[in-house]
Image: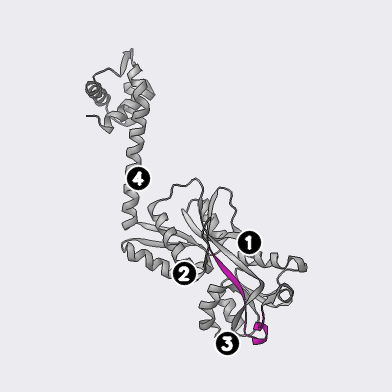
Amino acid sequence: MLSLHQLRCFLAAYEQGSLTAAAEQLGYAQPSVSEQIRTLERSLGTPLFIRVGRGVVPTPTAETMRPYAERAIAAAEEARRVAQEVTALETGTIRFGMFGTARLYAGAGLVADVLARHPGVRVELIGQNSSDVQESLRRGRIEAAMIAVPTVSSEGMAVTPVARDELVYISSDPEKLRSPVTAHRLSQASLVMPETTWRADDSTRIVLRQMLHETGRNPQTRIEVEDVETAVELVGMGLADSVVPRGAAEQLLPRLAPQAGWVSLRPRQYDVLAIVHRADASLSPAAQLMIELATKRIQEIAEPVHPR
């Protein structure tokens, strides 16, 4: 019966043209490699190499057999990798990228979903802003992530939209909430905006800049902060208004700014949320699990987008 050990010795001898060099490559003693090849030849009933001086020359049978041996070794390595990934799914660390706002109202539930299925794993949700998460993807720190689409460069990435989250205007002034906010009104508003470190690439600001393009103005920020919670608190104090995803408004306003409310923009504007991973990636079971659970969670909160 053929063994993987025999096939590895055969391929090493084929590639090196020498039993001694094959032994050095594999880290075995030369007599051991010779014995494995002789055993393989007996099993096949035909010689695989012709000994010439200190080297070996493959026979026609060896030439025919080589690609099959390579595929057998590759299949064995793939089986080992899959087995290790399944083990890691039970006891290892699962990493997934999730930008700040999405993590705000889906992160804890997502972690709970993972631990309910695999109580032995360690979970890491990585990232603050979509640009930050995308950089982690490109550097290979994570396999997959949920990102707001306007900030994603699709080059080298597979991007699958899964939901859209309406952007809404929040204010503690009831008069400002009587009707949807137009581009003209928005251009005159005094705003507090989160994500100041990523202000050039922040998906919400990109959408608002596109909305205001015809007015010739950019959104006017009176206050810049890092996190959406601080922005909502300041809105509750009446110091400024803001534009945030509806999911964040519905979760944070009752807790941080109970006197404030929200109203749609006119026309309505959306952040599109997408699952992103490297286009050439073979996703691990852990990454596939996180994509499944994150998509389910976010589609319960935001409006689902189903691929055509």
Q: Nearer the viewer, residue 272 or 287?
A: 272
Local crowd at mark 4 within 10 Å, few (<14), some, or many (≥20)? few
Looking at the rendered structure, the secondary structure element under dot 3 is loop
Looking at the rendered structure, the secondary structure element under dot 1 is loop
- According to the image, label 2 marks what residue? 300
Nearer to us: label 2 or label 1: 2
Residue 175 is a magenta residue: yes
- According to the image, label 4 marks what residue? 81
**Quadrant in which the N terminus is drawn:** top left
Which is more N-terminal, label 1 or label 2?
1
* Identity of the residue drawn at 44% across and 47% down: 282
Q: Position of residue 194 (x, y in %)?
A: 60, 71
What's the distance in space between the residues labelled 2 and 3, CA to CA? Answer: 26 Å
- According to the image, label 3 marks what residue? 259
Q: Which stretch is magenta?
A: 163-179
Q: Is the Cβ of the residue at disc 4 closer than 8 Å to that at disc 1?
A: no
- Apparent side of residue 25 relative to residue 33 in the rendered image (left or right): right
Q: Against 284, is 274 above or below? A: below
What's the distance in space between the residues labelled 2 and 1, CA to CA? Answer: 26 Å
- Apparent side of residue 74 relative to residue 233 in the rendered image (left or right): left
Which is more N-terminal, label 1 or label 4?
4
Residue at the outermost front position: 308
Nearer to us: label 1 or label 3: 3
What's the distance in space between the residues labelled 2 and 4, CA to CA? Answer: 34 Å
- According to the image, label 1 marks what residue? 201
Local crowd at mark 1 within 10 Å, few (<14), some, or many (≥20)? some
Q: Which amino acid does label 2 sit on?
A: Glu
* Identity of the residue drawn at 74% across and 65% down: 213
Q: Quadrant of residue 74?
A: top left
Q: Which amino acid does label 1 sit on?
A: Asp
